[in-house]
Image (cartoon, rainbow, N blue to C red):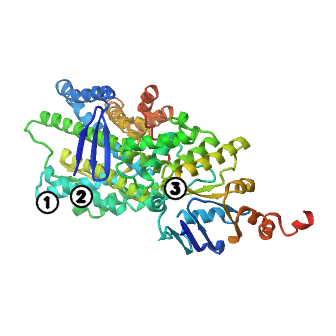
Amino acid sequence: MVEMELKRDRIVIRLGTKKWEWVLEPRYWRNTLLWAAFLMIAPAVAYFYSPGLINTMISANIYAAIAMPLALMTIGTGRMNFGPQFYIGVGGYTAALLSIAYGWGPLTTLPFAILMSMVAALIFSPLVIMARGLYYVLLTLLLPLVFLEVTFIYTDIFKGDTGLFGIVPLLDTGNAKNNFLLIGYFSTAIMFAYLWFINKILKSRYGLLMASINDDEDVAHSIGININKIKIIAFVAASTLIGIIGWFYAHYFSSFAGITYLPLTFMLKVLLVLMIGGRAQVFGCVVGGYFVAFLEMLMIRFMGPIQPLLFPIILLILLFILPEGLFGLYRKRRYREYLPTIHVRR
Amino acid sequence: MAPLVKVSNLVKRFGGIVAVNDVSFEIYKGETLGFIGPNGAGKSTVVNCLTGYLPATSGKIEMNGVDITHMKPHQRVHMGLARTYQIPRPFPELTALTSVLASSISGKKRINQSFQDAMYDATHYLEFVGLFSKRNILARDLTFYELRMLELARALATTPQLLFIDEVMAGLNPGEAKNAIKMIRKAKEEFGITVFWIEHVMAVLMEAADRIVAINYGSKLAEGTPDEVVNNDDVIEAYLGKGWREYA
């Protein structure tokens, strides 16, 4: 069975004829730990000074947690998916409908939300084999919009015009402020879990195979990579991770309306998180998530009515002057990894 | 001796155009088989059919007695076929080392190979082709000769039995070309591979190949030792035209 062996700088894991090595590099952990500590302390500080900020942090964490699987999907399939919010819709509506119909709590609805997102992703996964380039973009762009129409057409089920209400909340301690703090930590935990998991995948052999598929699919096939398998796995896994965010939204707000998440405006925000942080870099998604969420909050507070117009313009200017993204600037100065940065080509 | 690869009656049509018409030949273990023909004769199409890039319209391809006609490219790589491209196709955003690492991981299945073990493997192949000092350079920043060598390292890292080399001399200067030929010979000796070599430059194959197959308009013209093939009237006619005797 599984054999584990601790060596000086690595853990060697063996299973049958397979072997993995997990290299431990504590000297590289310092910055990551410092930032993690900062993100863990920030909600507690905000709790005493400005509880409203916790809400912004939750949005930031969740934006990052949507952008990270999207980055994984983009690299793993070699294609840019423009409709990840479809899976937020699938996960969210599954959780919301089950919770309202049967009064189920978040823990009971979670497996169903995961299952439904996975099934939906499997149904649409042939797209990554059949379509490429612009056709893939168009097809994935259409999916959430069609789903949005469906919520309006079958409004007696999905309540497309008013949204679904009365979902069992995620946490209930009896004190709204405490709820906020706990949910803040929960969203940070989700974000960190995604960050760890996706970074681990991208740094492993599967990440390298995905990077080569992202670079040139045909050549990747000709060096012996089963590209269809890898693309479908990356697509389904990432979609499922995004579906879990839908579940979070439904139980966090105790209400779920497709019109909030399914239109293009929400996708634009996610896309900007991905690009502002640094093209499809997982650590960049966290930077981008916090940047976009706080910018949005400041704009709403100080710009008032022109905010919806100004917000995308500022972000577009930033995209123009910061092509590598915010995390790219940091990486440029401190380049120390043996694996290269993975850029998105299509 | 049983052939390593046996191609029987291979046909490939693109709509109405017959690119490969009823070609049969055998590749024996340990030999260097040259494959020649004028421009547009169907050489690359044959290689694409053999490596699974294009599905054959009809015919049969066997490797070690196993029918591989309908296998996907990655399955054929796992069987022991590897190829290089006529125009190098590197992974532009990966470094030289990681490009080779990718094929070391994904090539023929090796047991007990971790990511780090594959990295040692990859360094060995890079060192073999003389690119070790360029290991951390992005593939898109390498020169043309280095890209050719990277392609070779990438193909060797899948541990093939049979290596398809598609016009290795194109675009190289005489010095580089000499090195490239030396490298392929060395690879053949060191890794015990069989080489299937497509080439335009006859002089190279005269020197390097054990046997040569010549094709024109998708059909086989001649097969035999280099001397036999270059003295074959059909082959000379295919290259020089019908009236070549008048000008000879």
Say which of A261 and A71 sits in front: A71
Chain ID of residue with mark 1: A
Q: Residue at x 17, y 33 (%)?
A: A181
Say which of B245 and A75 sits in front: B245
Specify few, some or many for label 1: CA neighbours under 10 Å numbering under 14, 14-19, or 20 or more: few
The residue tagged 1 is A101
Query: Mark 2 vs mark 3: same chain?
Result: yes
Looking at the image, the residue that sits furthest to the right is: B246
> Which numbered disc, 1 or 2, marks the residue that appears first in the sequence?
1
- Determine whether the residue tagged by mark 2 lies in a helix, strand or loop: helix
The residue tagged 3 is A218
Q: Is residue B27 left or right of residue B218?
A: left
- The amino acid type of the residue labelled 3 equals Asp
Location of residue A192 (image quadrant): top left
Q: Nearer the viewer, mark 2 or mark 3?
A: 3
- The amino acid type of the residue labelled 2 equals Leu
The residue tagged 2 is A115
Q: Position of residue B83 (x, y in %)?
A: 56, 56
Q: Quadrant of the N terminus of chain B?
A: bottom right
Residue A32 image label: none
Q: Position of residue B97 (x, y in %)?
A: 49, 40
